[in-house]
Amino acid sequence: MAKGAREPGSKRDSDLVARRNLAGARPLSDDAKYLPLILEPLRMCANYKPRFGQGRAAGLTLEQFRDLYRNDAFYSWFGLDNPLLYAAHKAAGGMTSIYRQIGIGCERVFRSILQDSLGLSSESVAWSYEVTRESGTRRTLSLDGRALLAEIKDAPVRRRFHDWMKKAAGGLGVDKRVSSALAGSVFEVRQGYKSKDSKRQNADLSNAATAYIQGYLPCAVILSSQIDTDILTRYRAERWVVLTGVIGLKDPLRSTYDFTQEVLGFDLAGFFERNQQVLHQEIDGVLRALLSPEAS
């Protein structure tokens, strides 16, 4: 499969409608709980201001930017105090902020779905561990969600989740002696994964190793279908379960939306589709604010 290509089955079709009628799917009333988890971080993007290397947490206003560049002889010779340059910086940084905040919102939604669907406490659904730096200081690392089999009280739900774990581990070639000892699964949630940042990859692979040591099956949950093929191959080779945002696969071992539908009993694709008009409006407002040099 070429880089950036979608996995087979990504085309929308009538199967999506059929899947939404599966028994156990939760009601639309959950939208009122989950939608604000997406919108709150997204709205922060409209207030993004570039820092221009000044280290200010809030960034510079247009007026502060123009003062900074006017007082720099070299930049002033080129006329770089132009408000359009400020708008360009604002837009460039803001685009990164949009992707980041969408990812944060999706992480919150997924963790909340995990908690509600499996009947877990907020403490149980969190997972972190400490590592020691070369300097001797301690650092805490965490993933975005955890599901402990022993804490899923509903027997059919626990059995369904455990069956998914066993199939996912078997598909990765995890030794049965290891998979049979797994106490649950931990999740890392991303809106997409197109970057080839080696530092991030190495950190993820280290997280996976720690997860297995502590008795968890590591799972990367990608909400979009956009993940670099090399990364996808590498992660699966390192025994990460990787779910991607493809529609119509009918495979909870590979599709984020099939997993949430068939294993967690929540129609996440339907949630996004029902609320796409609101999401479109929010993004449009954020983009308009970012593309204007004036303060939002």
Image (spheres, helix red, strand yellow):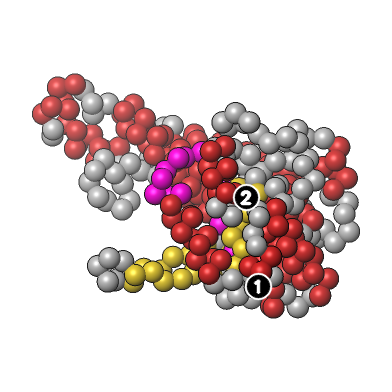
Pointer 2: residues within 10 angstroms few (<14), some, or many (20+)?
many
Residue under the image location 45 percent in, 44 percent down: 97
Looking at marks 2 and 1 on the same chain, the residue that comes earlier in the sequence is marked by 1
Q: Quadrant of the N terminus?
A: top right
Q: Is residue 102 left or right of residue 133?
A: right
Q: Which label sits on residue 161?
A: none
Q: Is residue 264 magenta?
A: no
Q: Is residue 205 left or right of residue 268?
A: left
Q: CA distance from mark 2 to mark 1?
A: 21 Å
Residue under the image location 57 percent in, 76 percent down: 123
Q: Is residue 194 magenta?
A: yes
Pointer 1: residues within 10 angstroms few (<14), some, or many (20+)?
few
The mark total stands at: 2
Residue ID for mark 2: 242
Residue under the image location 22 percent in, 46 percent down: 54
Residue 130 figure quarter? bottom left
Depth order, front residue of 96/126: 126
The secondary element bearing badge 1 is classed as: loop
Q: Position of residue 216 (x, y in %)?
A: 60, 67
Q: Quadrant of the C terminus?
A: top left
Q: Given the image, on which type of amino acid does mark 2 rest?
A: Val
Q: Position of residue 190 (x, y in %)?
A: 55, 50
Residue 108 seen in this snapshot = no
Q: Given the image, on which type of amino acid does mark 1 rest?
A: Ala
Q: Which label sits on residue 181?
A: 1
What stretch of residues is rendered in magenta?
186-201
Q: Residue furthest top?
A: 78
Depth order, front residue of 45/130: 130
Mark in the foreground, 2 or 1? 1
